[in-house]
Amino acid sequence: MATLQIRIDDGLKERADILFSSLGLDTSTAVRIFINAALESDGIPFPVKHNKASNELLEAIEDTRHRRNLSKPYKTAEEAVKAMLEN
């Protein structure tokens, strides 16, 4: 039997351990499941792609780039929040 060693961020490992434990698994078993699924599907067993931004977000980005539909400047954060809550 072979040993696989990888280096990952401590926080990432801790979060993974918590998640897999909640599923009744240890992290080593979860990694073995992933590798078996990859071999069965002859690739990564889930889509690997960029998250697509919503049309609303893309429109807001374009508005900002072209300085359209912008609200007025506010003197304080409280003033800006009050204006947002009014809409």
Image (tube, rainbow, N blue to C red):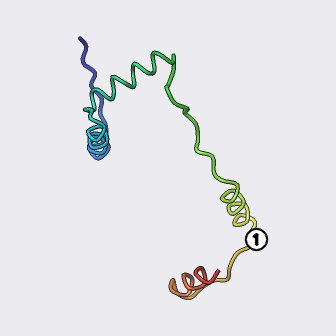
Front-most of residues 22 and 1: 22
Farthest residue, direction top: 1
Q: Mark 1 points at which residue?
A: 68
Query: Residue 60: image x %, image y %?
Result: 69, 63
Measuring 70% from the left and 55% from the top, which residue is drawn there?
A: 55
Query: Residue 42: image x %, image y %?
Result: 51, 16
User: Quadrant of the rendered structure where residue 83 is?
Assistant: bottom right
Query: Residue 80: image x %, image y %?
Result: 57, 83
- Reply above or below: 32 against 67: above
Left or right of residue 19, residue 87 in this image = right
* Number of marks: 1
Measuring 71% from the left and 63% from the top, which residue is drawn there?
A: 65
User: Quadrant of the rendered structure where residue 72 is?
Assistant: bottom right
Q: In which quarter of the image is the C terminus?
A: bottom right
Task: Residue type at mark 1: give it.
Answer: Arg
Measuring 51% from the left and 83% from the top, which residue is drawn there?
A: 77
- Reply above or below: 53 against 45: below
Within 10 Å of the Cα at label 1, are there few (<14), some (14-19), or many (20+) other Cα atoms? few
Front-most of residues 54 and 20: 20
Q: Judging from the image, what secondary structure is the residue with disc 1 in?
A: loop
Measuring 51% from the left and 18% from the top, which residue is drawn there?
A: 41
Left or right of residue 52, residue 69 in this image = right
- Reply above or below: 62 against 71: above
Query: Residue 45: image x %, image y %?
Result: 49, 26
Left or right of residue 84, residue 39 in this image = left
Front-most of residues 20 and 43: 20
Q: Quadrant of the N terminus?
A: top left
